[in-house]
Amino acid sequence: MKYFSLNHNSQDVSFLDAVRKGLAPDRGLYFPNEIPKLPEVFYNNIKKFSNHDIAFQVIKPFVGDDIPVDSLRKIVEDTLNFDFPIVPITETMATLELFQGPTLAFKDVGARFMARCLSYANEVKKTDKLTILVATSGDTGGAVADGFYKVEGIQVVILYPKGKVSEIQEKQLTTLGENITAIEVNGTFDDCQDMVKSAFIDADLIQSMPLTSANSINIARWLSQMFYYFIAFKNRITPDKKLAVSVPSGNFGNICAGLVAKEMGLPIDQFIASTNINDTVPDYLNSGTYSPKKSKPTLSNAMDVGDPSNFIRIQKLFNNDIFKLKKILKGYHYTDSQTKKAIKEIYEISGYIADPHGAIGYLGLKEFLESTSDAYQGLFFETAHPIKFVETVENTLKTSIEVPERLKGILNRKKESVSIQTYEQLKSFLLES
């Protein structure tokens, strides 16, 4: 499998080369030359396969010969060492819990898969030391920090917006030390993302150090998110009904991976992009005009993205045909007050405690199901454990959330970060370090 730049001004590269580069030299996102189809017999017999077998079959065509079969199987097994439970909420709606990994966020899958691919490249191909530069609006930072912690030959620098991530999220990315450095930016997530993009086109930096990104612009982070769509289809509660999936969406890598899975033949009938007031994509689906906006802070901070990087991949997948896209993808957006109301509604209906992102996924699914007369099984993604938004959830529900054991250890650790305000400060820090 080869990967080309969506800016169409760089040479095609192999899987591992694309992973190491992150962005193409022309600053375009990499995209596979083809989307392979899996045979119908695979889907007909999917319940017979383990999660590891499913993930291996899904990702193998995208990796090609870059990683041997045995090594790739080991990478998949190490990545998926936790479950993805489906929890019923109503007769027609359930949630897929994606927060059972080490940092309690859906991004554990992509971060762990990418880290292990790069670790293989370092060990076997003896590649140069690599600096990973990543912007986070919440959960990406913690997942990347955990996934790459103490990986030899890799230095990780994480940019996050000051005062705009939860306390637990901040602890997860600022307390590890070793090869992990946290940069606290006086600005928004979009400012962090702009700094990362600026670094990748800075000739001085590029000549001084190999750089890549662990955001979902990286194909290893992005494509491996397909795994849990296939696992969800395997474990769906009512196989006789059409399946609709609602994805809390920020940078749109997650739902883009789901759309690639569908292109591979996975029988998901409807996708719902559920956002907060950062509604660039729902607005596009409604108006036909794509107009990026400055991001606004919300309770669902991991979705505070005004110019989602991955949407260009979705447009490519559908050849910029908005009418074709709208047949498969619906988009809805919700306010903080609606989010809190949904958290309360879910709890009253089922006793289930959702985080703000999952609550928005619930709202999008609910709105879609109420708009159609077809019989669907609805699934919304719960992308983070509610403990990561403990103040919002506990104040809304007037109840307490138990801290998971694997989080208790970090709460008393000392925060260590570097504060910056401008790109030049970031550049100076990288060159000096």
Image: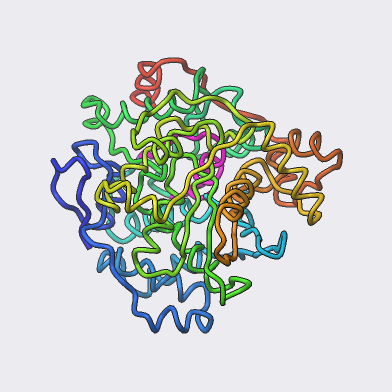
How is the structure coloured here?
rainbow
Left or right: 381 in relation to 350: left
Left-right relation of 11 to 41:
left
**Identity of the residue drawn at 58% across and 39% down:** 176
Spot the residue most to the front: 373
**Quadrant showing the N terminus:** bottom left
Q: Report the side of 360 relative to 148 (left or right).
A: right
Q: Residue at x 24, y 40 (%)?
A: 28
Residue occupying image coordinates x 46% and y 53%: 110
Residue 226 seen in the current view? yes
Please state the horizontal and vertical placement of residue 146, each as a whole percent of the image: 55, 47
Q: Is residue 302 visible?
A: no
**Total labels drawn:** 0
Q: Is residue 142 magenta?
A: yes
Q: In the rendered image, which quarter is residue 8 located in?
A: top left
Q: Residue at x 34, y 33 (%)?
A: 290
Residue 142 horizontal/vertical position (percent): 56, 42
Q: Position of residue 126 (x, y in %)?
A: 28, 55
Q: Which residues are magenta?
A: 131-151
Q: Quadrant of the C terminus?
A: top left
Q: Taking 358 as reference, is 425 above or below it? A: above
**Which residue is nearer to you in this view: 256 or 272?**
272
Depth check, front residue: 370 or 193 = 370
Q: Residue 373 is drawn in which quadrant? A: bottom right
Give residue 184's position: percent from left, percent from top. Answer: 52, 24
Please say if 77 is above or below 432. Answer: below
Q: Is residue 146 located in the magenta-colored stretch of the structure?
A: yes
